[in-house]
Amino acid sequence: MPTAKSTLSTSDLIRATGVKVTPARMRVLELLNGAGRPLSHSDIESALVARPIDRVTLYRVLDSLVASALALKAVDTRGVYHYSAAAAHHRHSNHVHFHCTGCGGSFCLDAKPPSAPKLPRGFQLSAIAFELRGKCKSCISG
Amino acid sequence: MPTAKSTLSTSDLIRATGVKVTPARMRVLELLNGAGRPLSHSDIESALVARPIDRVTLYRVLDSLVASALALKAVDTRGVYHYSAAAAHHRHSNHVHFHCTGCGGSFCLDAKPPSAPKLPRGFQLSAIAFELRGKCKSCISG
DNA sequence: ATTCAAATGCAACTAAGTTGCATTTGAATC
DNA sequence: GATTCAAATGCAACTTAGTTGCATTTGAAT
C-alpha cells in the first residue's frame, strides 16, 4: 500500500521551486537525501552508473538544486565541491561536526555551534562555519 | 644602513628547516610574508612575472614550504588552494575573520575564536575553523 | 674543486568544472 | 489527445588547477 501524504514527495519539492520535474533531478535529489554525507559530482556519477547521467547535465542539475535551495554546496579540503540535500542538512545544523583527516569521516558531536560574535556596524551575516578537524579514535589506535 | 639582527631572515628560516635556500623559495616566502591575505598559485605567479618561476616549480616550492610549516595551505570557497606565511598567520590566530561574499574581502574582527567543545573519548583535535560569511558594509550600501 | 642529493624546467597528463549549440522533453494550453 | 515552446539534456570542446616523470642544473657539504 502506498503511503498517504506523509511528507512532501521529492517531485513535489522540485515542482514547488518552479522548475521541471525530470528524472535526473529526481534521482539526484533522492540520492542526496538518502546519503549520510555530502557527495561530490563523481560520487554521484558512480552512484548512478546503472542509468548514467551526462557529466554536464549532472553539474547543471546540481547547480539548479543549489539555486533553488534544495541542496547545499561546499568545498572539501581537497578543493572539490560536495553537495548535500538541504533537508538532510537541517538535521545537522544544531550541533558541530568533527572531520577526521585520516579516514575522511565526519562525526556529529553533542556540542552546539557557537553563536556569532558582534559584527562591525553595517555588516550582514549570512553563514557561520565552525568545524573541528583532527584524527578520530580508530585512525589513532588503528 | 642594513638592519643588525632584528629577527630571523627569510634565508635563515628556510635553512633552519633543512632544505636548500633557493631564489624561488626566498621570493615566494617573502611574498607570502608581505601579502596581507592568502595567495593562490596564480596570484603568486602574477606577482612574480618580473622573473617568472616555472608553474610546476612554484607548486613544489609551495608544497615544500607547507611541509616545513613555513606556510599554510587552505582552500577557498571556489575550491582553489591559497597559501599564507605561517608567521603572518600567527598574527591572525587570536581573532576571528569575516569573509565578504560580495567583494571577496577578508576582515579581522575583535572577537576571539570560540574554544573547542568536548570531544568524544580517543579523538584528537588538530585544527578549529571558525569563519563568518556575509556582506561587508560597502558591498551592502554600494 | 669535486660531488651528489635536492631542486628545477619542461612536457605530458589528470581531474574538476564550464561554455556553446543542436536536440529532446515536461507541462501548459488548446 | 495534439500542439507548442521554454527548459532541460547530451555532446564536443575548452579552461583551470594540480600532478607525474624525467633529464638537467645547482646549493652546500666535503
Image: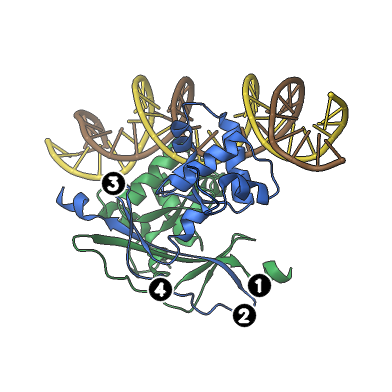
Chain colours: A green, B blue, C yellow, D brown
Q: Name the amino acid, label 3.
A: Cys
- C-alpha gap between disc 4 and disc 1: 22 Å
Give the letter of the chain under mark 4: A
The spot of residue B77 in percent (x, y) is: 41, 49
Choose top left, top right, bottom left or bottom right for residue B7.
bottom right
- Vertical placement of residue A69 versus B41, above or below: below
Give the vertical position of A34 relative to B56 (above or below): below
Mark 4 vs mark 2, CA separation in Å: 19 Å
Instruction: Report the mark closest to the observer, 2 or 3.
Output: 3
Q: Which residue is label 2 attached to?
A: B121
Tell me if I can see residue A22 in this picture. no
Q: Nearer the viewer, residue D4 or A36?
A: A36
Residues at badges 4 and 3 in contact (C-beta under 8 Å)? no
Q: Are marks 4 and 1 in contact (CB under 8 Å)?
A: no
User: Is the residue under label 3 in contact with that under label 1 (CB below 8 Å)?
Assistant: no
Q: Tell me if label 1 and label 2 are in contact, CB under 8 Å.
A: yes
Q: Position of residue C22 (x, y in %)?
A: 36, 20
Q: Label 2, label 3: how many angstroms apart (C-alpha)? A: 42 Å
Give the amino acid at mark 4: Pro
Q: Quadrant of the N terminus of chain A?
A: bottom left
Of circles 1 and 3, which is in front?
Answer: 3
Number of other residues with Cα within 10 Å of mark 3, as a class: few under 14, some 14 to 19, many 20 or more: few
| Kind of element beneath mark 4 | loop
Looking at the image, tell me whether mark 2 or mark 3 is earlier in sequence order. Answer: 3
Q: Are marks 1 and 2 on the same chain?
A: no
Quarter of the figure with residue A113: bottom left
- Could you tell me the amino acid type at mark 1? Lys
Tag 1 or tag 4, which sits nearer the N-term?
4
Tell if the residue under mark 4 belongs to the same chain as the one under mark 2.
no
Q: Which residue is mark 1?
A: A137
Q: Which residue is mark 4?
A: A113
